[in-house]
Amino acid sequence: MASNAILFITLALFNFICITFAFDPRPLQDFCVANPTGNATCKDPKTVTADDFFLSGLDRPRSFNPYGVARAIANPTTVPGFNTQGLTFTRVEFVLNGYVPPHIHPRASEVIYVAEGMVEVGFVTTYPDYKYYSKVLNEGDVFIFPVGLVHTVRNVARGKTVTLAALNSQNPGFIFIPDNVFAAKPAINSNYLAGAFKLLEFTVKVLQTKPWFMFL
């Protein structure tokens, strides 16, 4: 009986440790404003101002990429005060029929809020089910993408759509499935990809020559 209790406690502690390391560490001070010199130290608190925690103009129009998406982001790069807070915040504007390719955030869950327009969102569970949970979101709606799962976002409004999203990591990671596979340098073996995706090798080679680009 005692051995069972010890085993249970050990497993519980192991699970707690795994959860702890799954997300950004908790800060050990009030804040650690990113140092403008680019080194790993915090900015001297005596020189910190309110502007270190502030960003203006997230609503201003950005240039649209070929997917019909314009993205503005608040993270430690654009707001030094975000450093060590475990957060990223984005505003994404979609033109008619704009979309974000299937992608993954390996280190963060994501909450999306529709500020204007309408989007269809969804995520796919892991092996063996591959179940696709999808939902059309209208203005004022919220949806969450669980950490590490492939998810999709596309504009289904008759005009533009604007979404806001928060991720619980200052470096959530962005893995865009098409880009990662077909734009890899050096290229992944085309015969291998043809078998994996059940495509003709010629089709794979054509995809590997497409002008893939950084979504961000």
Image (cartoon, helix red, strand yellow):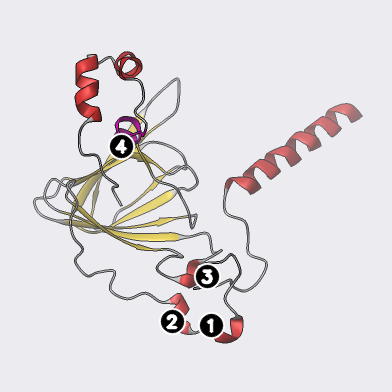
Q: Nearer the viewer, mark 2 or mark 3?
A: 3
Residue 88's spot in the image, x, y percent?
43, 59
Count the labels in the image.
4
Q: Which region of the structure is painted magenta?
A: 177-185
Q: Which residue type does callout 4 highlight?
A: Asp
**Which residue was labeled with disc 1?**
48
**Disc 1 versus disc 2: distance between alpha carbons?**
8 Å
**Which residue was labeled with disc 3?**
34
Which is nearer the N-term, disc 1 or disc 4?
Answer: 1
Q: Which residue type does callout 3 highlight?
A: Ala
Q: Please determine whether, in this image, residue 205 is positioned above or below residue 160.
A: above
Q: Please determine whether, in this image, residue 156 is positioned above or below residue 169.
A: above
**Which residue was labeled with disc 2?**
51
Q: Residue at x 63, y 64 (%)?
A: 27
Q: Which residue is drawn at 22% across and 28% down?
A: 207
Dot 1 crowding, Cα within 10 Å, few <14, some 14–19, many 20+ = some
**Disc 1 versus disc 3: distance between alpha carbons?**
10 Å
Dot 3 crowding, Cα within 10 Å, few <14, some 14–19, many 20+ = many
Q: Which residue is drawn at 40% across and 68% down?
A: 78
**Disc 1 versus disc 4: distance between alpha carbons?**
39 Å
Left or right of 178 on screen, residue 155 = left
Residue 123's spot in the image, x, y percent?
36, 37
Q: Nearer the viewer, mark 2 or mark 4?
A: 4
Magenta portion: prevailing SS class = helix
